[in-house]
Image (cartoon, rainbow, N blue to C red):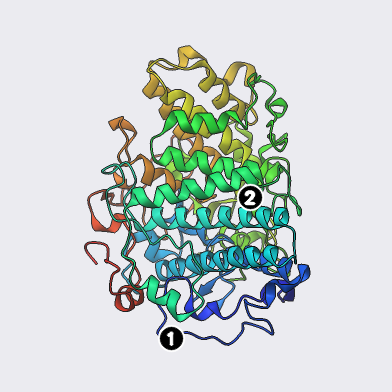
């Protein structure tokens, strides 16, 4: 059962217009008893509207049914992982994504687009409504500005997800390829729909300009701490998002400048929990498991999407159900792949192997390695962490390593800070400058550590995308990497140094049209200025 105050938010029937203008006609009936003109007339209704935008980030549409975790309740993790090679899809649930057999009508990419632009439109309606509420004295200008900063953070987060999945990376042609529509106005009347239908796709560079504008507004106006903690946007999360966006642009020095706001000047890699953010007080938890208890709002989480027993993406989408072992009460549909699990660089005594993963029965009644990062297998109440402090530290490690050509000791220290939390003997297992022959070797270690630290968190596709045109050739993925065959399982394929099965799903080159998702067919049909991605 859903919490009514979230699902009956008074944003007028933009559910029918949905963000992209792809519906045939406007439905101007109210979503509930209020219209978007009346919802912003009391402080209580304003708060309902803000909560509703967050809920649109958690729950979206899947073939007409709501509450399937699009875009950020679960789908960003599932789709980001299944486009990469470090998780393996065991049955048909994510097969189209996993095998890159999607087309302009397949459900996963169509509903990702639809629900993400729905979230964007909800945010835009709220931004305009907040402005009216402040002008009429319903709320103070300060309250309105803070809430608008939250909405712009969500708007940037959503647009960045779209440009990564549906457009070529920024570093391919310095952003000259076609991007995705950047909606910064509410689509809630016929004139707005006409505007949508007259705006062609901008370039990737134009999208990134808008992304940075939204991030800057959010950073300037978000509070250091927000209530409820971690599930409402706060300043550190906006800084982390801007770091990530700048890294997709290859602007390492600018990304480092943002990261410096979140990391103290002096750090001790041997005491990871002592490294505390000057903004928000974020730090690594004592163990890697600390960020992942059900409904976690731990000090390590900068921003997380709330799921609980009453409000979650449901049995067909929730992270605990999809990613947990069937022997623990979950469905056992997405397992860790031996491609990452068997790497010798992931030390046998690394605590992440035993605290964040377990061998268990899968949906095929055989054995696989499953994550325990989302432990509420029965009631499906595990939150989805969007930014953890571990990611801030590893992003900054990469930024430091990219600047100049020498092996950076601070980069090594940042890498070790995350790694030392889990390795069996930090004093002897940590990296030193002698561990790396050159800058490239250090970067390879950082990128590999990201795969160990963030497996089953949906970040792999973002890294594959942004690295595909890296200036350092050896860092570039082959495109969509080779994977285990869909459904591959069995305990015998797991183990450090164990050879992978002889048959793998072949890699797909970066030049292949399938590197991008297709624009949904309805969008192209009904928006005459929207150009389809090549090959579809």
Q: Is residue 376 left or right of residue 481?
A: right
Q: Quadrant of the N terminus?
A: bottom right
Residue 219 visible? The answer is yes
Name the residue carrying label 1.
25
Quarter of image, res 329: bottom right
* The C terminus lies in quadrant: bottom left
Q: Nearer the viewer, residue 416 or 28?
A: 28
Whether residue 500 is visible here, answered yes or no, is no
The disc, 1 or 2, on the residue closer to the chain's N-terminal end is 1
Q: Residues within 10 Å of mark 2 (few under 14, many from 20)?
A: many
**Secondary structure of residue under mark 1:** loop
Q: Quadrant of residue 46?
A: bottom right
Residue tagged 2: 373
Determine whether the residue tagged by mark 2 lies in a helix, strand or loop. loop
Query: Residue 110, image x and y in percent?
Result: 41, 70
Give the number of the disc on residue 500. none
Q: CA distance from mark 1 to mark 2?
A: 42 Å
């Amino acid at each position: 059962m859903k919490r009514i105050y979230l699902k009956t938010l008074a944003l007028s029937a933009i559910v029918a217009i949905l963000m992209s203008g792809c519906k045939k006609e406007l439905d101007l009936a109210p979503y509930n008893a209020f219209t978007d003109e009346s919802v912003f007339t009391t402080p209580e209704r304003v708060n309902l509207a803000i909560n509703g935008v967050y809920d649109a980030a958690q729950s979206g549409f899947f073939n007409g049914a709501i509450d399937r975790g699009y875009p950020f309740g679960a789908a960003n993790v599932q789709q980001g992982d299944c486009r990469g090679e470090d998780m393996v899809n065991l049955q048909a649930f994510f097969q189209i994504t996993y095998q890159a057999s999607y087309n302009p009508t397949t459900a996963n990419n169509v509903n990702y687009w639809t629900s993400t632009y729905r979230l964007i439109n909800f945010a835009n309606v709220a931004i305009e409504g907040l402005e009216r509420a402040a002008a009429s004295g319903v709320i103070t200008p300060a309250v309105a500005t803070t809430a608008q900063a939250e909405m712009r953070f969500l708007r940037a987060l959503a647009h960045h997800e779209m440009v990564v999945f549906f457009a070529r990376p920024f570093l391919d042609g310095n952003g000259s390829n076609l991007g995705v529509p950047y909606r910064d106005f509410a689509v809630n009347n016929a004139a707005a729909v006409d505007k949508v239908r007259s705006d062609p796709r901008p370039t990737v560079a134009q999208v990134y300009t808008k992304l940075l504008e939204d991030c800057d507004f959010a950073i300037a106006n978000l509070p250091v701490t927000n209530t409820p903690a971690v599930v409402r946007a706060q300043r550190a999360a906006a800084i982390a998002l801007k770091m990530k966006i700048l890294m997709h642009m290859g602007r390492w020095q600018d990304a480092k400048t943002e990261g410096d706001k979140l990391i103290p000047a002096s750090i001790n890699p041997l005491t990871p929990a002592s490294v505390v953010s000057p903004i928000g007080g974020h730090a690594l938890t004592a163990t890697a498991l600390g960020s992942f208890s059900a409904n976690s709002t731990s000090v390590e989480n900068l921003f997380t999407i709330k799921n609980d027993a009453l409000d979650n993406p449901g049995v067909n989408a929730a992270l605990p159900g999809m990613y947990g072992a069937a022997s623990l009460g979950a469905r056992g549909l997405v397992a860790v792949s031996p491609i990452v699990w068997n790497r010798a660089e992931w030390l046998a005594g690394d605590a992440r192997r035993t605290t964040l993963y377990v061998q268990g029965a899968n949906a095929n009644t055989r054995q696989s390695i499953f994550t325990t990062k989302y432990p509420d297998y029965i009631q499906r109440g595990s939150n989805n962490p969007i930014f953890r402090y571990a990611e801030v530290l590893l992003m900054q490690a990469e930024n430091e390593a990219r600047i100049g050509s020498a092996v950076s000791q601070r980069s090594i220290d940042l890498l070790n800070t995350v790694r030392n939390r889990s390795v069996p003997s930090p004093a002897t297992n940590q990296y030193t400058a002698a561990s790396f022959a050159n800058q490239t070797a250090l970067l390879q270690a950082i990128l590999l550590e990201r795969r160990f630290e963030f497996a089953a968190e949906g970040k792999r596709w973002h890294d594959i995308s942004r690295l595909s045109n890296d200036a350092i050739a050896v860092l570039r993925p082959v495109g969509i990497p080779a994977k285990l065959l869909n459904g591959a399982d069995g305990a015998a394929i797991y183990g450090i140094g164990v050879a992978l099965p002889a048959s793998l799903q072949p890699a797909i080159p970066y030049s292949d049209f399938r590197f991008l998702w297709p624009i949904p067919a309805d969008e192209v049909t009904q928006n005459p200025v929207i150009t389809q991605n090549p090959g579809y």
